[in-house]
Image (cartoon, rainbow, N blue to C red):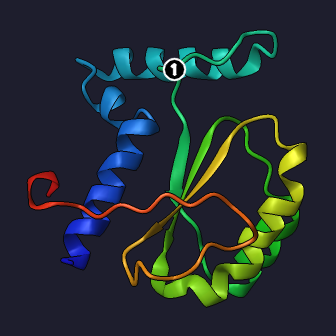
């Protein structure tokens, strides 16, 4: 598969989920700020049920040792979260994924881990459900 196309698709998917595209589509600075403030206000409303259109946090996991130590012990999602991870970094990230599995009961929001690129024949880890898919020519 075309690694650049797969990575671009993953980033576009993350931008759709995290509201970046919605913010960019606003007609001006004031409208963008109003949207961001509305999202922050919704985050602060602990009693408000999450809605399907609410933005997620989404981004690439950082693989440096200090970032990984911090991630394994201190990561706590503030809203639904999509973590993008480069499949080529699977060995370096295995402990971080295991830490998420161990701590997931403490999370108040769903967290999803998406391996991007690399070999699709790797086995499931940590007894997690795994859904594999490949981008077809039409999806690129």
Q: Residue at x 16, y 53 (%)?
A: 139
* Residue 80 placement (x, y as % from top left): 63, 37
Report whether 22 appears left or right of 55.
left
Horizontal placement of 86 versus 107: left or right?
left
Above or below residue 77? Residue 87 is below
Q: Which residue is drawn at 40% across and 84% down?
A: 119
Q: In which quarter of the image is residue 71?
A: bottom right
Report the number of discs: 1
Picture residue at 74% right of the left edge, 73% below the top: 96
On the rendered image, what quadrant is the C terminus found in? bottom left
Image-based side of 79 in relation to 13, left or right: right
Question: Which residue lies at the image location 80% right of the left edge and 61% below the top edge?
Answer: 101
* Residue identifier under label 1: 52
* Above/below status of 106 relative to 54: below
**Which image quadrant: the N terminus?**
bottom left
CA neighbours of label 1 inside 10 A, class few (<14), some (14 to 19), many (20+): few
| Percent position of residue 18, x then y | 46, 38
Along the line of sight, the residue nearer the viewer: 93 or 125: 125
In the image, 110 versus 59, the foreground residue is 110
Residue placed furthest toward the left: 138
Image height check: is 46 above or below 139? above
Which image quarter: residue 35?
top left
User: Percent from the top left, x then y, of residue 86?
Assistant: 47, 76
Mark 1 falls on what kind of element?
loop
């Amino acid at each position: 598969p075309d690694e650049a196309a797969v990575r671009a698709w993953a980033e576009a998917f993350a931008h759709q989920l995290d509201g970046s595209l919605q913010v960019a589509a606003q007609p001006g600075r004031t409208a963008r700020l109003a949207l961001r403030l509305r999202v922050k206000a919704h985050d602060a409303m602990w009693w408000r049920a999450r809605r399907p259109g609410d933005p997620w946090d989404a981004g690439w996991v950082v693989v440096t040792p200090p970032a990984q130590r911090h991630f394994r012990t201190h990561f706590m999602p503030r809203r639904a979260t999509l973590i993008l991870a480069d499949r080529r970094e699977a060995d370096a990230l295995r402990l971080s994924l295991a830490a998420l599995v161990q701590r997931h009961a403490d999370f108040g929001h769903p967290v999803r881990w998406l391996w991007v690129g690399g070999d699709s024949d790797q086995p499931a880890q940590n007894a997690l459900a795994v859904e594999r898919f490949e981008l077809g020519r039409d999806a690129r």
